[in-house]
Amino acid sequence: MRSIILLICSVIFISCGSETLPKPKGFLSLQYPENSYQKLSLKRPYTFDVSKQATVKDLPKNWLKITYPKLKASIDITYRPVKNNLRELLVESEKLVFEHAIKADQISAPREYINDEKKVFGSIYQIEGNAASQVQFHATDSTKHFLKASLFFYTKPNYDSILPAINYIKKDMIKMMESLEWEE
């Protein structure tokens, strides 16, 4: 009996050496390369600046896939000529944005873009939450050309984890829209 009490007391004294403190939260320190751009080198009815960090894949129908291999992401570019169907194209574009509402926490109000000189008119949407696509934009000259871009990651969406990459690529998408020009 005495040995059991001695053993319990020993364990108590040995285990109470120091106070345990919770570990502070760790934050990722992700480093992204400086943004630098070059003109799209493929012949299309449009042109814009593309990040030098990305790879451009040629697709049929004047479509593109701009990939970011290190970030496991891509921007899918679709092009459609306007043939008295601009309203239909705009409705379809918005419908594709709001299809993500099921998984999204929030879809921001569209940020409008207007460049009268280049005849580029568009909207960009940010989709917050675990949706399949987090940033989308469309642009048109309202008479001949319609372009849509959607950001996708090749992983199960975890918004908090991919947010730095979303913000990095979103800057590239804004640059695409701002540098967009229509070829005649």
Image (spheres, rainbow, N blue to C red):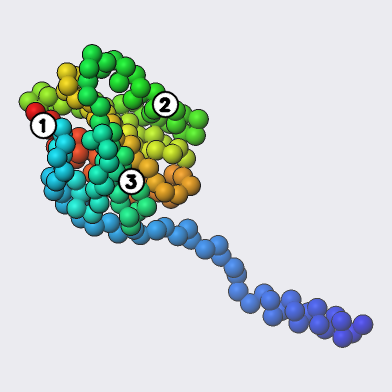
Query: Considering only order in the chain, which callout, 2 or 1, is on the residue closer to the N terminus?
Result: 2
Question: How far is the residue under mark 1 from the one under mark 2?
Answer: 30 Å
Residue type highlighted by circle 3:
Ser
Please indicate whether residue 45 sits to the left or right of residue 131 in the image. left
Under circle 3, the secondary element is: strand
Q: Which mark is residue 92?
A: none
Question: How far is the residue under mark 2 from the one under mark 3?
Answer: 20 Å
Q: Which residue is tagged 2?
A: 98
Q: Quadrant of residue 13?
A: bottom right
Under circle 1, the secondary element is: loop
> Which image quadrant: the C terminus?
top left
Give whichever of 126, 59 is nearer the camera.
59
Q: Nearer the viewer, mark 1 or mark 2?
A: 1
Q: Which residue is tagged 3?
A: 74
Q: Give above or below for 30 relative to 99.
A: below
Q: Which residue is tagged 1?
A: 183
Is disc 1 in contact with disc 2, using a CB cutoff of under 8 Å? no
Query: Considering only order in the chain, which callout, 3 or 1, is on the residue closer to the N terminus?
Result: 3
Q: Nearer the viewer, mark 1 or mark 3?
A: 1
Q: Give above or below for 161 relative to 127.
A: below
Residue at image x 33%, y 25%? 93
Residue 97, position in %: x, y?
Answer: 38, 28
Residue type highlighted by circle 2:
Phe
Residue at image x 45%, y 37%? 131
Residue type highlighted by circle 1:
Glu
Query: Considering only order in the chain, which callout, 3 or 2, is on the residue closer to the N terminus?
Result: 3
Q: Give above or below for 130 relative to 53.
A: above
Residue 109, position in %: x, y?
Answer: 34, 26
Residue 69, position in %: x, y?
Answer: 32, 55
Q: Nearer the viewer, mark 2 or mark 3?
A: 3
Residue 124, position in %: x, y?
Answer: 28, 31
Give whichever of 105, 131 is nearer the camera.
131
